[in-house]
Image (spheres, rainbow, N blue to C red):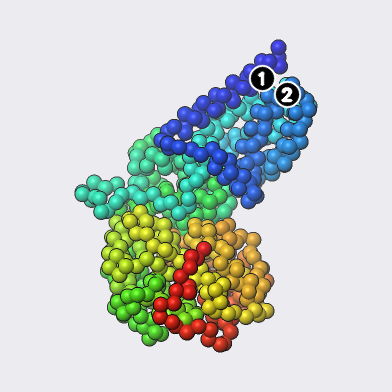
Amino acid sequence: MIDELLMLLFLVTFVVFIILLLGRVKLYNKRKINITKLILYEFREALKGGVGYMHFSIASGVILSLLLAISSSIFSLSLILWIISLPIMAGLIMATIYRARVLIRSNVIHKRLNADKEFIRESNKMQIILLCIIVLTFLDILLSVFIPKLSLLIGTVRNVFLALFYVKPAANLIINYDRELTSFKIPFRLDEVSDIENVKFGYEKISDVDREVLLSCQSCGEIGACDEGCPAVAAGRLLSPRFVVRTVSLNSNNPGFELAIKLEHQAWACTTCGMCVYSCPVRVNHLDVIYGVRRALVAQGRVDRKIADVLLSISQYGNTMSSPNVGRHDWLRELGVKTISENPDAEYLLWVGCMGSFDGRAREIIKAFVDILRKAGMLDKIAILGDEETCCGDPARRLGEESRFQEIVLKNKQLFEKYGIKKLITICPHGYNVFKNEYKEFGINLDVYHHVQIIQQLIEEGRIVVKRGDTVFTIHDPCYLARYNRVVKPQRRILVKLGDIKEPPRHGERTFCCGAGGANYWYDVPEEKRISHIRFEELVSTGASTIVTLCPFCNAMLLDAKRTKESSVEVKDIAEVVLESLKEERLIENTPGDKGASSKIS
């Protein structure tokens, strides 16, 4: 009788959890959910290790405990399931240790941010509950074969905790597991607005926060993966991605709560590197809040002088460098690069960008890339906009000036249509991301290439030949190239032909920010240690003699760290490294109509 009662309680509490979960999922109004893809996503995350494996262990542990309970009357089957669950139990032990570490780290962060007592209490409560769920799941599985009655009792208590506290995180994962990091929530469409005065620009108050963003924030389970990977947290800035979304969650029933004022310093401390979103096992999108708050602060005029200067420069000059736009590409024409009006049949538009056009160091990167194209016989296949090129709009959008961004997009749309631009090359990952992913929302579909992809293709096609040396390289993957857009293979396929590669602990999609993202390059943020210095030290610790960059901003930040630390390690762009490694003989002459480099680039 006791066995049956315990089994009934276990199943009833689990069914209640499932019913509540389905009810929460319906709130998102998502029409179709692909369960197969969700399961495959969880497996892929588990294979990455770390928090992904631990979260998979918790989810699969709950399922296994259910199967063990149902099969408890068949000892042989229970034993097989128990043996299968051994890796899961190992993951749960890891998760328990991890949770204890997060709890300690969270208190340090709370002190730094001067969090109030209520926030700290709610944070600690949620973390302890999550720890209890993990421990109870472990004990449920461990005892299922040996002491089934106790296992059912423990599982029932765990199910109650799930029903009370973990419905929201689970629902958010089910809904948003397939949302790409490149997905940007557009607050309004300037070309569709009839009365700009009534447009809601950002999240000034809780009542301004979009419903799906609110649901996402309420799903934060204090897992802490966002804080662990955040460069701002590592640098001692006044930011915690977890604090941001929990602030929204804990005040979600207070529509008048002044969100923008509360999160002002945290919003500007963010580099928008995306590691918080990438790391979150339940797919909370912290950046939706960061951008929403920034838009509100810009609308209110609550920006410091340097941010205001950048936005003013974009408005007055059409670039971020406070320089007249006239003649921005004259130096490139001296190198033999023609404008699109002079070379209307060009296959690619070379988008030079603000840094590439005006910054001396970034110009050297552009020159190196142009030299590679010349040696490959491709100079006649590219063209530039000359004085017609302005900002791509990325800094304006990242800073929260959405109206200006959309004005720039619509202007560039006219230019692209005027010249029939279909393919675009850029050396800047921020430009790459905005052209590839965010211009699409405004009807602009381009084939966008980062210059490393072009260089890789030229090498593979034999249009340029490189020689191997004894240089040891380490790669700094830009966040917007590697994490946002998963471009990680071309640079490695190139450098393995030139020398040895030593990877830093954080590389590829899990790269660590240089500190310039989110337009942080243009203004100062108080911090205990510069993000660029943290990254530079990590790269130097590999023992490599050359740090290879793929972004003019990363290059500038790491060069600054190199100078400060008086390091002998070289910091070079991928184009410069390849140019230095080219064999002397010219391989291919410019041939009109030759489409040798027009095959698909991956």
Amino acid tagged 1: Met
Let me know if residue 116 appears in the view.
no
Residue 40: which numbered mark, if any? none
Quarter placement of the N terminus? top right
Residue 553, compared with residue 342, is above or below; it is above
Question: Which is nearer the eye, 434 or 159?
Answer: 434
Give how far apart the Cα atoms at labels 1 and 2 are: 10 Å
Count of number-bearing discs: 2
Name of the residue lying farthest toward the bottom: 585
Q: Secondary structure at mark 1?
A: helix
Q: Secondary structure at mark 2?
A: loop
Q: Which residue, given by chain and number where applicable, does mark 1 sit on?
A: 7
Precedes in sequence: disc 1 or disc 2? 1
Q: Locate residue 508 relative to residue 115 in the image: left or right.
A: right
Asked whether the beta carbons under mark 1 and mark 2 sit within 8 Å of each other, the answer is: yes
Give x and y (percent) for residue 211: 38, 39
Give x and y (percent) for residue 195: 21, 49
Q: Which residue, given by chain and number where applicable, does mark 2 sit on?
A: 72
